[in-house]
Amino acid sequence: MIRSLHTSASGMEAQQFRIDVISNNLANVNTTGFKKSRAEFQDLFYQEVRAARAGSAGEDRGQAAPLEVGLGVRPTSTQKMFTAGDFIQTNNPLDMAIEGNGFFKVRMQDGSNAYTRSGAFVTDKDGVVVTQSGNALDPPIILPPETQSIVIDRDGTLKALQPGDTEAVEIGRVELAQFTNPAGLRSVGYGLYQQTETSGDEILGVPGEGGLGTVSQGMLETSNVKVVEEMIDLIAAQRAYEINSRVVRAADEMLRESSNIR
């Protein structure tokens, strides 16, 4: 019975972790470019009471299956779900959405690289195109002073119209990055991800080529969190937590009965 107490406690801790993941998903339901997470679990090792064995001559029929009992569950990972979110039109010329695979590559302030699906870009005081957190696009794009309007083609080509000009002039190109295993990327907050050994190396390319998506100007990708789905998962986790707590209560009552035997 003591074993069942620890096993049920591990189940309660696992469901609490699942609820923590769900709560973060729901908290970011309106976060641009946010990708929801899914908690993954695995059973713990098993205690073998009696091993399976083959029968021998005579009446010994052996043991076809082992006699064993599991010792609970534990969280193993939180997998990012990189399904596309809905697209909304903003008419902001620097807003961009990726239709398909890929990430915007940005340069962090400490010099490291990061990747994001959030295309809500602005310019700093020097005209450099940056994220809302101030991280510049990589390769950098700088808008010339007195730029009247900008045009971003679906292949990432960015053009700027200057006073006195009749046609916009190309000033840079937005490149996209993709990974063999995007689920292996490490979340660092602010809608940013960083490369890890399990994600593989970045594969840079032009939007619309090599399996990369295209860029849509004046659009933003919203969170891919579906509130109804998260609420269903929340109910399931809550009920699983309740069931495990009942097992703890049952084990406690059995221990109490055992201690009252005279």
Image (cartoon, rainbow, N blue to C red):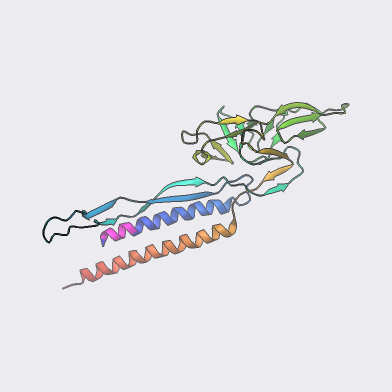
State how many labels appear: 0
Where in the figure is residue 51, as x and y percent of width and height? 21, 53
Q: Position of residue 115 (x, y in %)?
A: 58, 35
Q: Quadrant of the C terminus?
A: bottom left
Is residue 207 part of the magenta span, yes or no?
Answer: no
Q: Residue furthest bottom?
A: 262
Tell me if residue 31 comes above or below residue 61 in the rendering. Answer: above
Asked if residue 60 is positioned above or below residue 142 in the image, the reply reads below
In percent of width and height, residue 188 lies at 53, 39
Q: Quadrant of the N terminus?
A: bottom left
In front: 60, or 132?
A: 60
- Residue 108 visible in the displayed image: no
Image position of 208 (left or right of 111): right
From the viewer's perspective, is 255 left or right of 193? Answer: left
Q: Nearer the viewer, residue 90 or 65?
A: 65
Residue drawn 55% across and 31% down?
202
Q: Quadrant of residue 6?
A: bottom left
Furthest residue toward front: 57
Residue 137 placement: quadrant: top right
Instruction: Indicate the position of residue 52 as horizontal and vertical percent values.
Output: 21, 54
> What are the residue bounds of the magenta stretch?
2-7
Q: Residue at x 79, y 29 (%)?
A: 160
Left or right of residue 143: residue 99: left
Residue farthest to the left, as pictured: 58
> What residue is shown at x 45% (from left), y 64% (from top)?
239
Q: Quadrant of residue 4?
A: bottom left
What kind of secondary structure does the magenta stretch mostly adopt? helix
